[in-house]
Amino acid sequence: MSEDDKIWAQLARVYHTYGSPFKPTDEDSRLTKEAVASGWNGAADIPARSLLLMGVTPLLASLDWGKGVTVTAVDSSKAMIDALWPGDVPGRRRAVRGDWRDVRSLGYVYDAAIGDGVFNLMGFPDGLRALLRALSEVLRDGGVLVTRAFTRPAIRERPVDVLTQMYQGQIEEFSMFELRLLMAAQSGVQDGMTLSAAAAMWHDVIRAAGATSLTGEARWETQATETLQRWNESTFAMTFPTLEEIRNVVCEEFVEMSVAYPSYPLGERCPTVSWRLRRKA
């Protein structure tokens, strides 16, 4: 089993324990559906539509798109599909294993592509460009791309400040702490942040502070211990560009249509953005 397969198998087992912002909320799924509907209203009239779902995010997989829309979910992890996919429904939705950067090999074309946090799983900028090129090959002219992204603030936080706020009880949810720490630990967007490097930084700050607790919150100690165990030896990496950095790359293939921010804490870092594919020559 590859390193990526291991981390996704681990995530599949604990996905139910995550909260927002790592997992999308009903508000996020509504923003995604509204953005797709708005994009389709401005496109040519098509009696039946096909939608690509990158990943098997349960809230997005369960969205009701109405009559005539077929959803194809693509995920490279069998464990994620087995654990999270709500099941195939003939004529409405299906899940297949595959690489998003090679979706053309599946032989389908789509009117829209959606996903949650998918940009953050791509190397920046080359990995993101490869994904966008792949999507441009399977989306019809004027096709819509909608994704929620985790975006780093323009002024980078320091990991020690994030941990200090955690110890002082100023962070509401453990998943908010995780996201902020990963963003703060990233020295440069092109380098990204491996989970093992973030774990090492976490340990370093704890030792420097002489702390005896991982979080300062007894209710999160078990979750923190399990998280560090998963992170310690993992070379799995994520990238956290700013929204402007994402725009600078996506605009090479797509035209931005809208951006919407959810109302939950850290929502300003989790925009849902929609784009339309530039007309093909």
Image: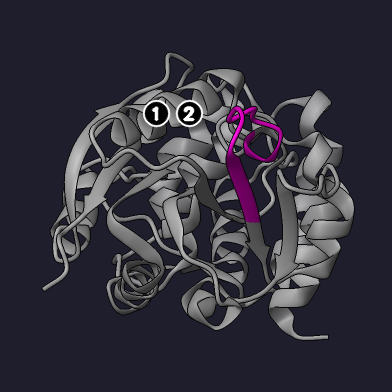
Please state which amino acid type lies under the numbered disc 1: Ala
Q: Secondary structure at mark 2?
A: helix
Tell me the residue that label 2 is attached to.
Answer: 33
Q: For residue 40, what is the image quadrant?
A: top left
Say how the picture is coloured. Answer: one colour
Locate the N terminus by quadrant.
Answer: bottom right
Q: Residue at x 45, y 31 (%)?
A: 32
Give x and y (percent) for residue 102: 51, 80
Q: Which mark is residue 24?
A: none
Q: Which residues are magenta?
A: 60-72
Give x and y (percent) for residue 142: 24, 52
Left or right relative to 32: residue 53? right
Give x and y (percent) for residue 227: 75, 52
Left or right relative to 6: residue 142? left
Q: Secondary structure at mark 1?
A: helix
Dots 1, 2 in contact, CB < 8 A: yes
Please state which amino acid type lies under the numbered disc 2: Lys
Q: Is residue 40 above or below residue 234?
A: above
CA distance separating discs 1 and 2: 6 Å
Q: As rendered, which of 27 and 53 lies closer to the eye?
A: 53
Q: Residue at x 39, y 28 (%)?
A: 37
Q: As rendered, which of 165 and 20 lies closer to the eye?
A: 20
Label 2 crowd bin: few (<14), some (14–19), many (20+), radius 10 Å: some
Give x and y (percent) for residue 264: 48, 16
Q: Is residue 221 above or below residue 225?
A: above
Q: Residue at x 72, y 39 (%)?
A: 58
Tell me the residue that label 1 is attached to.
Answer: 37
Q: Residue at x 64, y 30 (%)?
A: 63
